[in-house]
Image (cartoon, grey):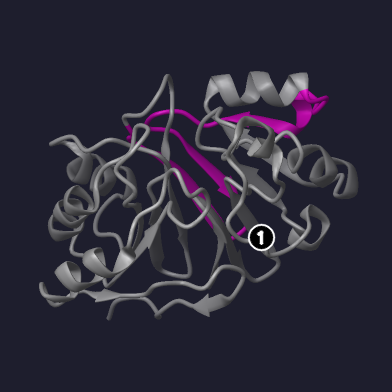
Amino acid sequence: MKLTWLGQGGFLVVSGRWRLAVDPYLSDALAGEGLARMTPPPCSPQELSPTLVVCTHDHADHLDSQTIPPIAQAFSGCLFAGPATVVRHLGELGIGPDRCRVLGGGEKLPHGCMTIAAAPARHEGDAIGVIVQAEGLAVYISGDTLFFDALADGVRSAAGGAVDVAAICINGKWGNMTWQQAVEVVAALRPRLAVPMHYGMFRQNTADPALFVAAVEGMGIKTAVLEVGLAVELPGPRR
């Protein structure tokens, strides 16, 4: 399985011919609101070539109205999923109900060799995190979330056990946990690999991943600071 950071909370997870895009923000749609990108998009919507897109919640840097329609137009077989508010917005963007799946708390969505489960999140409305299971691995992508005491237990419950990779927000602003709180969640989850994310997109809402990395590696947990657009191969399943 390969993982590519798309910037902010966005990831591409690839297993075989199945390509899951989570929260792809590949435009500069928020520049008009004073939130210009710090770096260019790593690819075009068409180059992403997903078979499934999951948006964790209905915010413009997670459900991008300039990224989703080109994907839907270019790839007629691509499906789209997310909480009810996301599915409603997808309909407003012209994506028919036959291509949309509601993915809410406690729900799972099979997709080829993958299973995508909704993980708990505390952000706005019906926001979720995502757990991707394939090839004997469980990959947790937090989406946007505040810290709360039951978060790690909820993630393990959604995964049906341990998670191997935890990609977790660290920016500490606008409804997201701080890097210190992210360290606390990682300490409870004990993944084989921890990946900081949700920084480096907007100057008004970023953080230094080095502090998170130092704290997590001090606990004996491996970390990876991903380069936007560069695919990394994930470790094999636990023995």
In the picture, the quarter occupied by the C terminus is: bottom left
Give the answer, above or below, for where 1 lies relative to 104.
below
The residue that label 1 is drawn on is 19
Is residue 164 at all visible to an observer of this figure?
no
Q: Residue at x 18, y 64 (%)?
A: 190
What is the span of residues highlighted in magenta in the rendered image? Answer: 93-121
Of residue 133 and residue 204, the one placed in the foreground of this image is 204
Give the answer, above or below, for where 158 lies relative to 229.
above
The spot of residue 102 in percent (x, y) is: 57, 27
Q: Is residue 171 left or right of residue 33?
A: left
Q: Residue at x 40, y 23 (%)?
A: 124
The spot of residue 215 in percent (x, y) is: 15, 68
Of residue 51 and residue 73, the one placed in the foreground of this image is 73
Is residue 103 at all visible to an observer of this figure?
yes
Report if residue 107 lies within the magenta region: yes
Query: Looking at the picture, which amino acid does disc 1 mark?
Result: Arg
Q: Residue at x 24, y 64 (%)?
A: 212
